[in-house]
Image (cartoon, coloured by chain):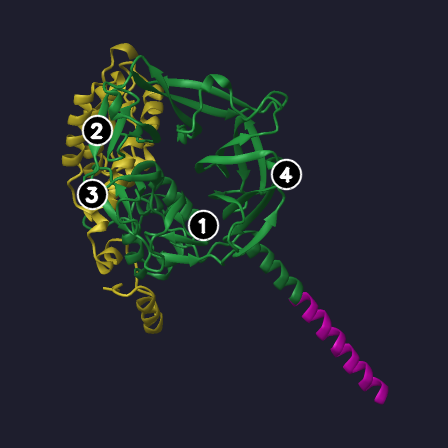
């Protein structure tokens, strides 16, 4: 028996395959039909992306406007800064979001969904240009298993704010207008559009309050396509430079506070509580960094990556990493690059932009069943008629 | 008495006897249960059997003995680094000959650390393999028709069936 490998049970087998890079999986499609089909099953794709997100996430950033904007850059786990080419069909685009290994890119009012690992591209149908100021977001909902782009346009008409909310669904491949709902009263968004747990989050200025503008958190539920506003406690000291991120599978926020002549970073986590009588969310400050040794070396916070808070210097050419466990600061010079506005934690995946099926697929089958039933019924009736008429003739 | 017992004897599926220290056996839930079940008094000579062949069991016990001190007491970062290096050396083995048996054993013995390590080692080895090498180690037949192969080649230029 030695020298002959045992047959591995499916569970072990999947556990090995989920650790392979997408490049290898594409190559191993040619092993057999079973393997090719396995790499297309939603459960395998989900397991692969889960592992990839936990173990292999890299940082991806838009280049600042002084650099060549045709490229995205990534920082790998060995802390190397590498160029990441944009899809050939869309130059000078900017990335607006990343979810499960898919990137959503925008150029003027053309969107593209792109899986850089599989090199699949989906050109999103065009929408008319925005009238007012446009805010966009990209996210995924496990509930409906769909990726959506949301575009909010806010324009001013006399003293009123006019809103237009459009949502693109990757499964139906079409845009539709959705209700403004609770968004009414929001003057502007900031902070990118952060995708987390089936929702997209932004900071927003709420002008409904009688005593002036107030900051809040805006969430867009990808499944139900509805907005909600989450109040931000004053103690969080949110500023225009605060960033949303995740920490230990919770929605989190990074903000900075002035300490003497320097800054320190605060990490807040937000948890939705069951009891909706209160404000709905509990904010907890779980970490405060040491003050930065040199104020000039730090400008704003970006994200959390592998137990480190990632920030950037004023010139946006040096990343500042603050280890959450050891409290140590580390600098990473980006060489000839500079960071644009946003940075994402990205993990490669097998998710296919051209093959996203929601309940649509099960509905499809149901319709086929109904159709078959009708064909059967119809032909039976016809046969009966045929026999009936024959009998009459006889 | 149980408190004085430092090692237990187990039988491999080939019938060979192996000694494993109590602290090392704690790395595996089933072994731990066996430990609790085994009669520690002198007049009891029941030896539990583990459904793992001798060659594999030697390696599994070697892993347990090495990892037990850290698992039981926690260790410094330098120890963790050293253990990582040891793991890499430990995993230098033939896929067909032993790695797959270790995978099965780690799964059967609920040893999360070893299971993860073995899965990752197998994946790392597969990255460097050709499609036909993969088919061979997993006992898989190429069931694509020549038309299907042609179609796949069109979709993924450069993909190879060999």
In primary-sequence order, the first of circles 4 and 2 is 4
Residue drawn at (31%, 41%) of the image: A61
Q: Residue A375: percent from the left, percent from the top? A: 68, 71
Can marks 1 and 3 be said to lie on one chain?
no
> Counting residues from the N terminus, which is met first, the one under dot 1 or under dot 2?
1
**Chain B in the picture: what colour?**
yellow
Nearest-to-viewer mark from 4 and 3: 4
Count the numbered circles shown.
Answer: 4
Q: Are marks 1 and 4 in contact (CB under 8 Å)?
A: no
Residue A199 location, x and y as percent?
Answer: 51, 38
Residue B147 occupies quadrant: bottom left
Q: Which residue is mark 1?
A: A42
Tag on residue A181? 4
Q: Residue furthest front?
A: A158
As helix, strand or loop, the secondary structure at mark 3 comes to helix
Q: Could you give the CA–CA distance between mark 3 and mark 2, rounded to whole angstroms? A: 44 Å
- Magenta part of the protein: which range? A372-394
Q: Residue furthest bottom?
A: A394
Q: Is residue B49 visible?
A: no
- Report the chain holding disc 2: A
Are both tags, 4 and 2, on one chain? Answer: yes
Q: Which residue is mark 3?
A: B98
* Mark sitting on residue A331: 2
Q: Is residue A13 visible?
A: yes
Which is more foreground, mark 3 or mark 2?
Answer: 2
Q: Same chain, marks 3 and 2?
A: no
What secondary structure is found at the residue carrying circle 2? strand
Secondary element at image label 4 = helix
Our reading of the magenta stretch's main secondary structure is helix
Chain letter of the residue carrying label 1: A
Q: CA separation, marks 4 and 2?
A: 44 Å
Does A97 sit above or below residue A284?
below
């Amino acid at each position: 028996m030695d020298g002959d490998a045992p047959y591995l049970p499916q569970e072990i087998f999947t556990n090995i395959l989920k650790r392979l890079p997408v490049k290898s999986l594409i190559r191993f499609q040619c092993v057999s039909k079973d393997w090719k089909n396995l790499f297309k099953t939603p459960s395998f794709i989900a397991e692969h992306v889960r592992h990839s997100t936990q173990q292999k996430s890299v940082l991806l950033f838009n280049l600042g406007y002084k650099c060549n904007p045709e490229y995205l850059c990534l920082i790998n786990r060995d802390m190397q800064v590498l160029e990441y080419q944009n899809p050939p069909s869309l130059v000078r685009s900017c990335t607006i979001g990343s979810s499960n290994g898919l990137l959503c890119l925008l150029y003027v009012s053309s969107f593209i969904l792109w899986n850089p690992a599989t090199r699949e591209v989906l050109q999103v149908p065009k929408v008319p240009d925005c009238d007012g100021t446009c805010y966009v977001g990209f996210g995924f909902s496990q509930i409906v298993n769909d990726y959506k782009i949301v575009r909010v346009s806010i324009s001013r008409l006399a003293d009123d704010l006019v809103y237009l909310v459009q949502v693109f669904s990757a499964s139906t491949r079409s845009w539709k207008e959705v209700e403004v709902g609770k968004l009414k009263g929001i003057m502007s968004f900031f902070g990118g559009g952060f995708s987390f747990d089936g929702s997209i989050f932004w900071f927003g200025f709420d002008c409904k309050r009688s005593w002036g503008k107030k900051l809040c958190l805006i969430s867009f539920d990808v499944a139900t396509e509805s907005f909600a506003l989450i109040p931000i406690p004053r103690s969080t000291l949110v500023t225009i430079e605060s960033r949303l991120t995740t920490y230990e599978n919770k929605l989190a926020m990074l903000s900075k506070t002035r300490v003497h002549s320097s800054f320190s970073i605060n990490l807040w986590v937000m948890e939705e509580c069951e009891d909706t009588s209160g404000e709905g969310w509990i904010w907890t400050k779980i970490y405060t960094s040491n003050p930065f040794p040199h104020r000039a070396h730090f400008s704003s916070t970006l994200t959390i990556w592998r137990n480190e808070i990632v920030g950037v210097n004023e010139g946006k050419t040096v990343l500042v990493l603050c280890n959450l466990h050891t409290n140590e600061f580390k600098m990473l010079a980006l060489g000839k690059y500079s960071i644009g506005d946003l940075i994402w934690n990205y993990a490669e995946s097998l998710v296919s932009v051209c093959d996203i099926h929601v309940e649509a697929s099960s509905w499809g089958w149901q319709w086929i069943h109904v159709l078959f039933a009708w064909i059967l019924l119809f032909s039976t009736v016809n046969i009966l008629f045929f026999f009936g008429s024959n009998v009459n003739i006889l | 008495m149980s408190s004085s017992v430092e090692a237990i004897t187990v039988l491999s599926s080939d019938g060979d006897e192996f000694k494993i220290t109590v602290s090392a056996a704690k790395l595996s839930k089933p072994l731990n249960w066996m430990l609790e079940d085994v009669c520690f008094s002198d007049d009891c000579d029941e030896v539990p059997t583990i459904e793992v062949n001798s060659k594999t069991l030697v390696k599994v016990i070697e892993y347990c003995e090495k990892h037990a001190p850290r698992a039981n007491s926690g260790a410094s970062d330098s120890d963790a680094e050293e253990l990582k290096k040891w793991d890499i050396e430990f995993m230098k083995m033939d896929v067909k000959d032993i790695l797959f048996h270790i995978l099965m054993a780690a799964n059967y013995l609920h040893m999360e650390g070893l299971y993860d390590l073995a899965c990752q080692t197998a994946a790392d080895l597969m990255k460097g393999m050709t499609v036909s090498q993969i088919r061979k180690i997993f006992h898989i037949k190429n069931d694509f028709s020549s038309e299907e192969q042609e179609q796949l080649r069109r979709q993924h230029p450069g993909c190879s069936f060999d």
